Amino acid sequence: MENLQAIKQRFGIIGNDIQLNRAIEKAVRVAPTDISVLVTGESGVGKESIPKIIHSLSHRKHAKYIAVNCGAIPEGTIDSELFGHEKGAFTGATQDRKGYFEVADGGTIFLDEVGELPLTTQVRLLRVLENGEFIKVGSSTTQKTNVRIVAATNVNMHQAIEKERFREDLYYRLSTVEIHLPALRERNEDIHLLFRKFASDFAQKYRMPSIRLDENAVKELLNYRFPGNIRQLKNLAEQISVIEESRNISAAKLKQYLPDNSGNLPAIVGGKKENDFSSERDIMYKILFDMRNDINDLKKLTLDLMKKNGNIEEIEEENHHLLEKIYSDKELKEHDIEVLNIPQNTPPKKDYDFIETIEEDESLSLQDKEIEMIKKSLEKNNNKRKLAAKELGISERTLYRKIKQYDL
Ligand SMILES: Nc1ncnc2c1ncn2[C@@H]1O[C@H](COP(=O)(O)OP(=O)(O)OP(=O)(O)O)[C@@H](O)[C@H]1O
């Protein structure tokens, strides 16, 4: 077996934790086989490196490796993305398209967030796993592919099965071998090591001396639970490296950047500690956040309108919920915006005049606020995306996409 340290170096993995080492060793051992592997662990623990190790040390290493974020692909297009489609299969399918399972023939597909796959897609996936067969969307011809699947999840799959969100047969097919990565709080001795590595990386990236934690700051760091795991630690190192002038970081300074474990936000977010959206500032952010979502919804409607040559009935039928959402004042009321005296505009139902919208470039500060809102909601809801999405008034899928997009 290739030396463990050499593998860690090759894949940029930092840490000496025994559970981490075991996970890497397991990945190395299963790599030459075609066994399906399920990587488990909380969000941000570094699951993405495991399929890369497996692919690179397998006989498939010269073929394609494709990583797919199942949670980030809209439900309506996921089958086509994975299995391809034929020309004319649906509106907009102007030509044949190969799916990832065809493109990666002979190689490896990493299905990240596999628990997010719609049930219909799970059926197709099960078939590929059982006999390598799939059918393109809109086709009646069965095709063959030879792909190794490594999947990952940060949700409890047994609960997902119980709630009938995930097929039990597929779970067993995917998890012939399960590789678990520990949460950062379970690998205490690696925390400072990782922090130093990230601090040194960011010092290089931003061409400045590296930040250093004093003794008490290290203690503070080690006592923190890191709900967002290594991703959160990395963001922390970057924030402090960029924002702080002094390179010596005290415990008090560090604390300002650590959301407290009960779910409150760090001081940089607003000074006063709050765990809801009740301050005017928060309400303002919430409104901006909702406005952005509305703009995105409007973009979708406009696109549909263009595609369907202005067939209003068809658009109304298909986008009923969107239209309700955009033109009703329900959501605004829910968030007490009367505090800010914003006039509420409620056009008559079913009378959707196409209002003139001025589309501005996404301003950086608005994006910052959005990131802040998401972080706040995740913290408040103990990283439970479902609850955070509900609170933010967006779908879990959109929230997932945003977490990935902003690397939260
Ligand atoms: N051992 C490690 N050494 C160095 N960097 C790491 C390590 N583990 C994770 N990281 C970094 O932490 C970040 C998060 O890792 P990754 O995306 O693999 O997490 P994940 O478990 O797949 O999260 P999610 O479930 O949200 O997709 C990445 O930037 C990755 O480079």
Image (cartoon, rainbow, N blue to C red):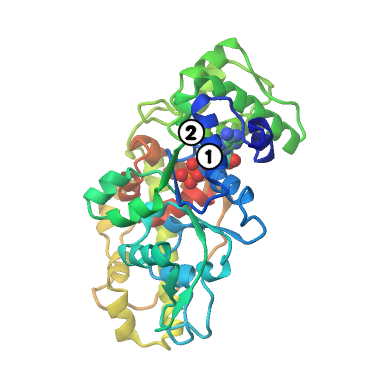
What secondary structure is marked by label 2?
A: helix
The count of marks equals 2
The 10 Å Cα crowd at callout 1, few under 14, some 14 to 19, many 20 or more, is some
Which quarter shows the N terminus? top right
Mark 2 or 1: in front is 1
Is 243 drawn above or below residue 105 in the view shown? above
Residue at the extreme right: 207
Residue 283 place in picture, x, y as percent: 36, 45
Q: Name the residue under label 2.
A: 229
**Residue 306 in view, yes or no:** yes
For the point 41% across and 59% down, which residue is it? 293
For badge 2, the amino acid type reads Asn
How would you rate the neighbour count of disc 2 (Cα within 10 Å): few for under 14, some for 14-19, many for 20 or more? many
* Vertical position of residue 55 compared to residue 243: above or below: below
Asked whether 146 or 310 is in front, the reply is 146
Q: Give the x, y percent position of residue 372.
A: 47, 41
Q: Mark 1 points at which residue?
A: 46
Question: Between 244 and 73, which is closer to the camera in this rendering?
Answer: 73
324, above or below 154, in the image: below
Looking at the image, can residue 396 be seen? no
In the image, which disc is placed on residue 59? none
User: Does any atom of ligand 1 lie closer than 8 Å to the CB of label 1?
Assistant: yes
Look at the numbered discs 2 and 1 and tell me whether their residues touch, using CB distance below 8 Å.
Answer: yes
- The residue depicted at 53 percent of the width and 39 percent of the height is 46
Give the x, y percent position of residue 280. Answer: 37, 41
Judged from the image, the secondary structure of the residue bearing numbered disc 1 is loop
Q: Report whether the residue tagged 2 is closer than 8 Å to ligand 1.
A: yes
